Image: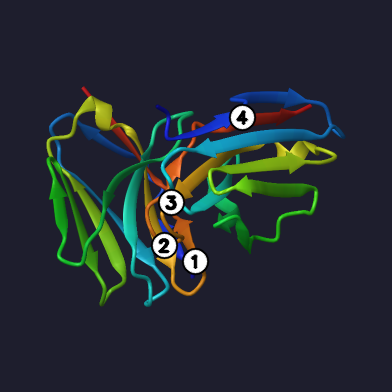
Amino acid sequence: DTAVSQTPKYLVTQMGNDKSIKCEQNLGHDTMYWYKQDSKKFLKIMFSYNNKELIINETVPNRFSPKSPDKAHLNLHINSLELGDSAVYFCASSQDPNTEAFFGQGTRLTVV
Amino acid sequence: RKEVEQDPGPFNVPEGATVAFNCTYSNSASQSFFWYRQDCRKEPKLLMSVYSSGNEDGRFTAQLNRASQYISLLIRDSKLSDSATYLCVVNKAGFQKLVFGTGTRLLVSP
């Protein structure tokens, strides 16, 4: 019954590897997001999709590539992982970009 | 000026106390305002939306002051379970996104 679900919950990987995080929402929302929360706990938007179209790309390195195969899914692929990519990545969805967002449980990425 | 600014705290209060947080925002055209709660190592969860007329949900009251561009959250009769970080969220008008404040940490002690 989880509204926004993302996998995996934990991801430990070596520098230079490529990894993906998957996200699915069953709320029927049109908008989905990826947020990054760093060690200082600041929550910053990375990408936003509305009806499968990219509407926000917040100057994220192009090693990060989001993909939205349909309105209910937004995946995040990260190439050539770096130590500084270690953070918690949250997927979220909302009815539209200006309404309340609902978050997945987060993926804690540790790059070693 | 930051888009959304909050006092990081922590606010240390005893059980039963009343505590208030303020948050200021820079974009006068913003229309949507929310308070979220985030527990340690958990995702942010919507606590309440903030309406122009103010709104109340049990022990929680949210107010919006458009003239001064701030929103507030009042928690009455604090419980231990209220200990968390409270995030102020405002839409960035014209940019189709929500902006999160850095959060205010609340610690309620017995």
Residues at badges 1 and 2 in contact (C-beta under 8 Å)? yes
Disc 2: which residue: A98
Q: Are there few (<14), some (14-19), or many (20+) residues within 10 Å of tag 3?
A: many
Q: Position of residue A52 (x, y in %)?
A: 60, 55
Q: What SS does tag 1 mark?
A: loop
Q: Tell me which amino acid carries mark 2.
A: Asn
Labels 2 and 4 within one chain: yes
Q: What SS does tag 2 mark?
A: loop
Q: Position of residue A26 (x, y in %)?
A: 45, 38
CA distance for labels 1 and 2:
6 Å
Q: What SS does tag 3 mark?
A: strand
CA distance for labels 3 and 1:
11 Å
CA distance for labels 3 and 4:
22 Å
Q: Are there few (<14), some (14-19), or many (20+) residues within 10 Å of tag 1?
A: some
Residues at badges 2 and 4 in contact (C-beta under 8 Å)? no
CA distance for labels 4 and 1:
27 Å
Q: Tell me which amino acid carries mark 3.
A: Ser
Nearest-to-viewer mark from 2 and 4: 2
Disc 1: which residue: B96
| Quarter residue B90 falls in | bottom left
Residue A108, numbered circle: 4
Q: What residue sits 60% from the left and 39% below the top?
A: A89
Mark closer to the chain start, 3 or 4: 3
